[in-house]
Amino acid sequence: MTPDPAADRRFMAAAIALSERGRGLSTPNPNVGCLIVRDGRVAGRGWTQKGGRPHAEAQALEQAMEQARGATAYVTLEPCFHLSPRGPRCADLIARSGIARVVIALRDPDPRTDGQGAAWLREHGIAVEMGVMEAQARAAMAGFLRRQTLGRPAVTLKLGLSLDGRIALADGSSRWITGPDARAHAHLERARHDAILVGGGTLRADAPRLDVRLAGLEDRSPRRILLSRGDAPEGWERIGRPEDIAALERVDHLLVEGGAGAAAAFLRAGLVDRLLLYRAPILIGEGMAALGEIGLADLADAHGRWVLTDERRLGVDRLEIYAAARGV
Amino acid sequence: MTPDPAADRRFMAAAIALSERGRGLSTPNPNVGCLIVRDGRVAGRGWTQKGGRPHAEAQALEQAMEQARGATAYVTLEPCFHLSPRGPRCADLIARSGIARVVIALRDPDPRTDGQGAAWLREHGIAVEMGVMEAQARAAMAGFLRRQTLGRPAVTLKLGLSLDGRIALADGSSRWITGPDARAHAHLERARHDAILVGGGTLRADAPRLDVRLAGLEDRSPRRILLSRGDAPEGWERIGRPEDIAALERVDHLLVEGGAGAAAAFLRAGLVDRLLLYRAPILIGEGMAALGEIGLADLADAHGRWVLTDERRLGVDRLEIYAAARGV
């Protein structure tokens, strides 16, 4: 079983893809992915399930059964070491499974584990490698990491724009700027967040349902949060200021859907980690701007803040994803 | 000399690249490119020179000399057949050169040639092929074609934008939105146009020089045109309405550089053929919009008008080029 770095990266990429399945579902636990591989073949796959249990490793080991013996486990986050009434410690579960080698993307920043999971594995004669595709794993578990390091959810701001940066005509009409493929993708993004937030103006103007209208994913509709000083309608939660997201329980990934005022408030507060720009190949001219005042006094301060991390075509539209340059 | 379609396309692409060198210089003649190839080797290259003479074919034949005998000529536009006091007819020049085969991208829409150049070549026993890489040649000679078919120059609208579609802060400051690579590219685009146009507001606010500030290209600075009802300063020409571009002599390629009012006026008049969007990865929020009122009453009418034809990175910025879907 000679380590093969290229194969390690390939299998870790698969584990990270599995972790994405738990995004928006796994709180209060991180959305971990796990792949168990023996002799180059996948013997088990797991990702943290709804509400956080079972953990990815437990699920993958249960699938692998006897195949775990001598196998390599790829885990996107260091296996947990802390005791919980809700289930077994993954580090211990792995140590007793016969797994020979564990490849980890990211050391767990939770002080109750923070290296102790890996140490436990090594003590039990298991080869451990840490840091494989760490950056990609960080992006997939951004919400958990923001919670751990900043005490707040990871915030994605979504904008559906014309080429000239408009989100509606002057009369407010915005159906449709982007096409069906882009709108379907935006619904998929909703399913990947624990909660969606809009401002009071958008609620009044659009009365958005903010659910996931994709076949088979209707039950993935996230919680709805209103940024407003007024009252929230039935079925909505409310916060008064962007900073209040820290107090939202079980929200690790928050999607801000607009409008221009709410978007600007989050940017002004420095609370946006990721931009989803759905861009339609149209010009609108006079119309509603994507953003209100974000507190920029000098153009020089605008630079170096956003890095393009992904892009794709969605029908005739294009999606660009930017990450805050300060990193996760 | 068996025709080889892949080789034909390759050599025609080179001829089209040559034709781009004359863009913004060759008026009142089209910016044609010509490559003479014998036994797979380039024997002569030419492109229509400043002011329209010599023609591409004449230049390429002069380079090729005796090598023209039995060679293939790749020409982006059908060789001219009409008599001119300014120089020889290219169709006749080629017929007498010993060239064995002529590959043409585009039939000349000028009624004085319009197929007669190709017929003349065939009458002289020369093999003629027409329509190779026609679409690419059309794009390269867009200005000439617009003049022939619509009686006006091809118009490119340039916008330097933030991700949220702003061209300046609310106080008007716009230095700099895009970085040095994007600005250098924009200067290169100036050199590829016969004239540059701005609106009165931009002239007053920015007092733009609108010259080409690239080493070796300073003398390629195009004519400066003001869209305004007022007077034009020394060294500027003036038009009162976008439609007046038809009357601009020797302007086949016009670059509209702003501001929002002039850009909107050209869009409203349906006179923009190409968009150059230089996009910086920054957010501005409240600020100056890229476009004023363009006369859009219904979102449905905005769709299907623009097609992405090219894109590239320019430092941290990105250039997107859109063409009007109605085509050239």
Image (spheres, coloured by chain):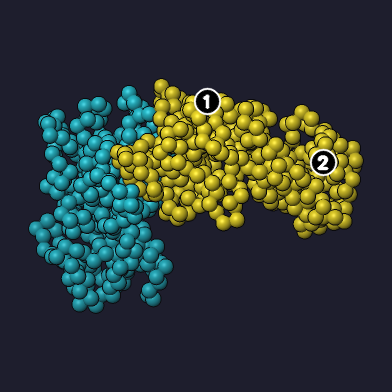
Chain colours: A cyan, B yellow
Q: Position of residue A300 (x, y in %)?
A: 33, 52
Mark with earlier residue (1, 2): 2
| Disc 1 and disc 2 in contact, CB within 8 angstroms | no
The kind of secondary structure element at disc 1 is loop
Q: Do circles 1 and 2 both sit on a common chain?
A: yes
Q: Residues within 10 Å of mark 2 (few under 14, many from 20)?
A: few
Residue at the outermost top position: B297
> In the depicted view, which residue is nearer to us: A112 or B4?
B4
Q: In the rendered image, which residue does mark 1 sit on?
A: B241
Question: In the image, is residue A285 above or below residue B104?
Answer: above
Q: Residues within 10 Å of mark 1 (few under 14, many from 20)?
A: some
Q: How many marks?
A: 2
Camera sees residue B168: yes
Q: Chain of mark 2?
A: B
Q: In the rendered image, which residue does mark 2 sit on?
A: B87
Residue visible at 30% across and 48% down in the picture: A298
Q: Position of residue A241 (x, y in %)?
A: 15, 41
Lateral position of residue B102 relative to residue B220, left or right: right
